[in-house]
Image (cartoon, rainbow, N blue to C red):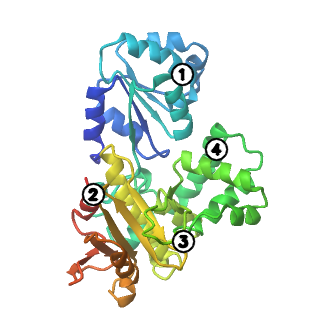
Amino acid sequence: MISRNAEIVLKKLAEQFKAIALTGPRQSGKSTLSRTAFPEKIYLSLENPDLRDVALHDPRGFLNNLPHGAIIDEAQRAPGLFNYLQQILDESNERGLFILTGSNNFLMLEKITQSLAGRIGYLELLPFCYDEIQMIPDYDLSLNNMIFSGGYPPIIFDRIDPNFWFPSYIRTYLERDVRQIKNIANLTLFQKLLYLCAGRIGQELNLNNLSIECGVDHKTIGSWIGILQASYVIHLLPPYFNNFSKRIVKSPKLYFYDTGLASSLLGILSPSQLSLHSSRGPLFENYILNELIKRRFNNGLRSNFFHWRDVSGHEIDLIVDRGSSAIGIELKAGMTVTQDFFKGITFWKSLTKHEKSYIIYGGKEMQKRSNGVEIIPWNQPGIFEKIAGT
């Protein structure tokens, strides 16, 4: 069993709220974490058709059989439960009564907003982060393997071959999760969008371009992108709006929640193949960004990450907004530090008064330059916590 960093925060939330919503991608470890953190609670999965049938047709009776609460997995599959939960939570003084997990953020949030707003704590769990994977004996912690394998527990912990697991995951996702959110008639075109997104990692989202390539209208693409976000397949990195008197680009950048899934969609079959692949740079960016986001989510915090680019082409891969200050970060997959690494950072420092700036790269040596730029290896202990502010 790998200890999850989010367990501490999950237990703290259970001490303060009467119910907890634990969301995240399918197979990210939500059920295991819930059962480990609360071993005394009854566990019920609404993936079970018999249980789901009772929850759908007799929600009051279903909940009345749980006087001491329970862990209810995939709770969004019986939306009627949320209405009856409201009364139960209002009448109880017990904290951490129900733990509701779900892999569909859109449907979970919709029901929580309608019925349980103010009564429920919220935590997002993504696949394993680097620190958690380090606990596995003899695991290959090389950069290429970390990007290629991603962080899903069945691949990392159970050692299932990614070339078998990800295609199965994608098929299950299309046939079950997507249809839960919206009954899309043409799943072939939706799947095409998924592959197109993988080829655009680290690029600004262009709905018109995707619309033309998929052969569907602009609004449909926007809706489908929303589905991919709600089901924790992709996430969008928003632009940083402090424009420093410059005209800036206001489109978000597209990334995947797991680089292993993205690698599979790109047709990468092994870590060695990744070495010379044209998408290695964007995948490296994606991997580092995900590690930072995982540190925030595991501590119950929202993302505070942005990107910045002006119309002249000057850009910074990552901005960490600290409120009164902002940290500029460049992400470089190369193992050798070159002058090209400093172009974005140098321009950023000329615009701002903020002294902190970093280059995270694929090499092994830590350096500190006279201009205040710290060059940090991608696996430097403590670096993700330091930058994420956790």
Q: Is residue 112 above or below residue 214?
A: above
Q: Check whether the beta carbons of the residues at disc 2 and disc 4 lie within 8 A of each other.
A: no
Estimate the spatial distance between the alpha carbons at disc 2 and disc 4, rounded to whole Å.
31 Å
Image x and y of residue 315, in percent: 46, 75
Image x and y of residue 158, in percent: 39, 52
Q: At 25% across and 56% down in the image, what residue appears?
A: 135
* Residue wearing tag 4: 178
Q: Is residue 197 left or right of residue 345?
A: right
Where is residue 216, by image quadrant? bottom right
Q: Is residue 385 above or below residue 201?
A: above
Q: Which mark is residue 131?
A: 2
Q: Is residue 116 left or right of residue 59?
A: left
- Secondary structure beneath disc 3? loop
Q: Which mark is residue 51?
A: 1
- Number of the front mark, 1 or 2: 2
The amino acid pointed to by label 4 is Val
User: Which one is nearer the viewer's eye here, 35 or 315?
Assistant: 315
